[in-house]
Structure formats: C-alpha cells, structure tokens
Amino acid sequence: MARVIVERNIPVPMRDGVVLRADLYRPEGSEKLPVLLSRTPYNKALPMVFAMTLDAIRAAEAGYNVMVQDCRGRFASEGVFNCFTDEARDGYDTIEWAARQPWSDGKVGTYGASYMGVTQWLAATAAPPSLKAMAPSITASDYHDGWTYQGGAFALFFNVSWTMGALAPARLLREREKNPAVSAELAATIGSIDRMLSTMTHLPLLEFPMFQHGAPYFFDWLRHPSYDSYWRSLCIEESHAKIGVPAFNISGWYDIFQGGAIRNYLGMRSHGASNAARAGQRLVVGPWNHAVPFANLVGSVDFGYQTGAVSADIDGQQLRFFDHHLKGREFPNDPAVRLFVMGINQWREEREWPIPGTEVRRYYLHSRGRANSAGGDGALSLEPPADEPSDAYLFNPLDPVPTNGGGLCCYPAALSGGAFDQAGIESRSDVLVYSTEPLAQDTEVTGRIELTLYASSSAPDTDFTAKLVDVGPCGFARNLTDGILRARFRESQSSARMLTPGKVAEFKIDMWNTSNVFKAGHRIRLEISSSNFPRFDRNPNTGHDLFTDAELASAMQTVMHDRAFASYLTLPIVPARR
C-alpha cells in the first residue's frame, strides 16, 4: 500500500486574483496521476468532510491525487462567500489549475455530497476541458425548486438550520475581528440553535432576526420566491446540454434533494453534451436521509446492515466509476441504476430509470364526505368516482400540521428526517386520509409519484400537501414520500396567479419518487392537508406578497372527487418479477 503524503493549504489562484487554498493527499512517488477534487464550504480540515461519500486517504492509496479545497471566503480561502454564485467560475479555475500541476496526468474528477455536489454541477456548466467525470451525492438539480423552495413553498427548516449551523457562524467569526458589531448576531445565531423550532415561528420572514451579516444571501432567497433570472442562471437542469461529463449520481429516498438527483440522471441521460456523457450516467438510490447519510437506521426504521456505509461501500463504488473514466479500466457488467427497494429491503440493479414495463395506475379518491383523519371514511381505489360529496377541513396556520420525518436537514437534534409512524398526524381533523383495502398481493411502487387534486379554498392563496404512506396490518403508517404546492404557483413557478375563492382549481403535486413493495395485507394510503411545518413555511392565506405578513388567516379547504372533478393519485406499478 502506497504511503500517502499530505500537503496543507496549497494556494490556488483564481482569475480575479483571489487565492483559494486546498489540501492535497497523494501517494508517495513521482508518477503523474488523475486528480479527484472536492470543493467545500464546511472546512476542508474537518472529519465531517471526509465522511461525505469518499475518503481522501483511501482514494490516494488507490492511485489518485486528492484535492480538498475551501470555497471562496470559507476558512483558509480568501474572498467573500456568496452562496452558489461563484462556484462555476471558481470550480473551472481550480479544475484547470489542478490539471496543469506536475503531479497530475491532466485528468480531473470531482466528488462530494450536498453543497459539494453543488460545486461540481456548477463547475460542469462552465465546461472545463480537463473535467472527465464527477460523482455528485445527495444534491439537487435546481437551486430554486428542490433546494430553497419546493412546489413554491419555502423550505424553512432546511434553509434556517443549514444557514444557522453550517454557513453563518464561520463568516461571523471571521468578520468579528474587523467588525465588533457582528458579535451580537453571532451570539444570537449560536444561541438560537438550542431553540431551533421556536425560531422557525418568526414573522414576517423578511424580517428574520439573524443572517443580516452572517448570510445576507438568505434574504435574496426570500426576495426571489418565483423562478426568475436570479435562479435561472443557477439551474443545472437548463444546462444539461452543456455538460459532457459522465456522472455517478447518489441519493436517498428520504433525502431532501432526492427529486433533483433523479432529474439530473434523467436530464443528462437524454440531453448530455456527448454520447459518452449520456451513456456514462449512473444512479444509486438507497433508503437514506440527508443529515445522517448512508446509515441503515433512517428515522425510526432500520433498513438493515446492507444499507450502511460499510456494506453499501459508497467509496468503493465511486472509485470503480473513476477507475473506468479516469484510468480506462473496463467493467462490462456495470449497471446503470442500483436501487434499494423498501418493503422487501433488497438492493436491485436495473438497466434504466423509469423501470421498463412499469404500469402507471390512477388510484381515485373516494369518501362520503368524511375523510377527515384515519378514522374517517376516505378510500383509494382504481374505480373512478361517481357522484360523491366533497371533503373539507379548516387550515389554521396558527396550528399547522407538524412535520414528522421525510426529507429533512440539517439539525436532527431538533427535527429528524426519514421514516416514522404517521399515526399522530393522521388523527387530526385537518388531515384527509384515503386508503386502499388491504392488498391481496404484494404491489411494488417504484418511480415518480404525482397527485392530481381538484380543490377550492376560501383564500386567494394557500397550500396543499400530499404524502404517500405504507400502512402495515398492525397500523404502523410509514411515510414514503411527499410533496407540497403553493396555490399561486400551481400553473407556473415563474409567475403567480391567485385563486378565485370558492372556485375549483387543478393542483398537480409532485411527490418525487420512491421504491417500495406494499406487502399483501398492507394498505396504500394518501394524506392530504395544507401544511407541513416547520419543514415548509406556513402560508398566511392572505394572498399578499410572500414573507411580508406578520398575521395569519385561516382558510376553508374543499377537496373534490366526483365525475366532474375526479382527484387521483398516480402510482408507477412494477410487475412482479418471475
């Protein structure tokens, strides 16, 4: 095994003269080797960075020069950190610098999770010629819808907890030396971590009591709730045709960015800038969530040792990918897609996504007008509705439906993501519950989930939420995936259109993806409500400019399921394997 040499704080000049610094892990010797680069805002010296999907020492021992760089304005690097906006340029400059070094053979691959995935995709949009492969993990495809917002709703818990815990303190500590006035904000930011959930209730959001110095870009996100030019310049999905690089996409069914990871795989598979890029896309999805990636315990459900970091060997899978694209090694039986199928808790390899032969079925909503709570009469079936009464509930944002698992980040001590029993949620009268009869046979649902909802509200703007749940014979109701849609953005994320109170409108709620076998005797269940707090901000139901309200109003919500307005859940059913 090669002895690994570590060089600290190597200066890397950017085109504007700012110097970023990187640590280099390389095997001893003079051989020119490929470079694996990870760019992070989280401090390249911290062990956490090494836990984010690829161990630098193991990679160096496998014959790579591994660079881990602090992003602009973070820790050892010069400049000012502006979230997202400098990563394409700085990533390009760093990749090309690394390719020209005497220890490099000119080929560069990138790796890393979450924001370290952001730095990869944004650099790839600039098309650095030396970039040959990338391995972005648990990261998004659009930093508007699927990172900062989802379905037009602000991802409140993520944005606040991530900014509060991972971004703002480092900047405040640096600026405190020059500007003592930021000391109060630093104390408030660190102190608020202990009262994270109460901090989420602050209104109006545009007057949030921190981040003015530590993370001013937080308020840019709030000032741009629609998909406009601010976000368009950062959208990976609109740049897939510019990217000619194979990518090893890694995600989790309960990951906060799961939808974007799969959209990146599909978009690059269809529109990548070269045949090699299109053919070289790979996708791995486990049952994981974001805050504790690659663990077998996801929320309150243990999916088995085979999903843990050691058994799943995410490091080894990435090195195999890089060995092919950077060293020319052949792996003839390399699968394009590797999925963990929940319910039967098994890994499975597929040729492509969506899975060939998938049957798309509509499960229609039914009730006698009393679908409120799991004790109501809501039902799901393949039969379209006849003349049925609607269901109604009062959405009071002062008493929102609480978040219970799902795609969450970044402070599990306050709120954990993953799989949990939803029984408490389903006892509420402001949650509509629709369930199938106990299934006669195992039913696999693998693919994209969508709810087509016909509903009205007494408010000019409101939210609708949807959650897919697997209910076992003992009553344990395990959440699988969910979604939200802000009514003003029901037709377009780029422009708002208010509701006419009392008038029925169509809502297409993207619930992202899952892979789960509903075992015989289980029920397929759908929850519908209007809040999931604090994962998403509460809609004040006023129709005013977003994030300006200090007051909240209630709204009466009506869900239709009759011949004229047949609401339905779309599920991708995979035929039984013989």
Image (cartoon, rainbow, N blue to C red):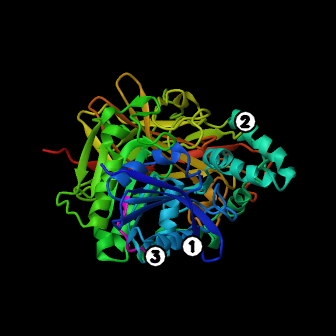
* x 37%, y 63%: residue: 247
Q: Secondary structure at mark 1?
A: helix
Query: Does the magenta run of residues contain 178?
Result: no
Chain-order first, disc 3 or disc 2 = 3
Q: Is the C-beta separation of discs 3 and 2 under 8 Å? A: no
Q: Position of residue 271 (x, y in %)?
A: 37, 73
Give the amino acid at mark 1. Answer: Arg
Q: As rendered, which of 462 and 191 lies closer to the eye?
A: 191
Which residue in the protein does label 2 denote?
198
Mark closest to the chain's N terminus, 1 or 2: 1
- The label number, if any, that marks residue 128 in the structure image: 3
Label 2 element class:
helix
Q: Which residue is mark 1?
A: 89
Is residue 247 part of the magenta span, yes or no?
A: yes
Q: State the residue at coordinates (63%, 63%).
A: 72
Mark identifier at residue 540: none
Looking at the image, do the residues carrying marks 1 and 2 touch, with CB atoms under 8 Å apart?
A: no
Q: Residue furthest top?
A: 474
* Residue 33, horizontal then vertical, whole percent: 35, 65
Bin the neighbour count of mark 3 within 10 Å (Cα to Cα): few under 14, some 14-19, many 20 and up.
many
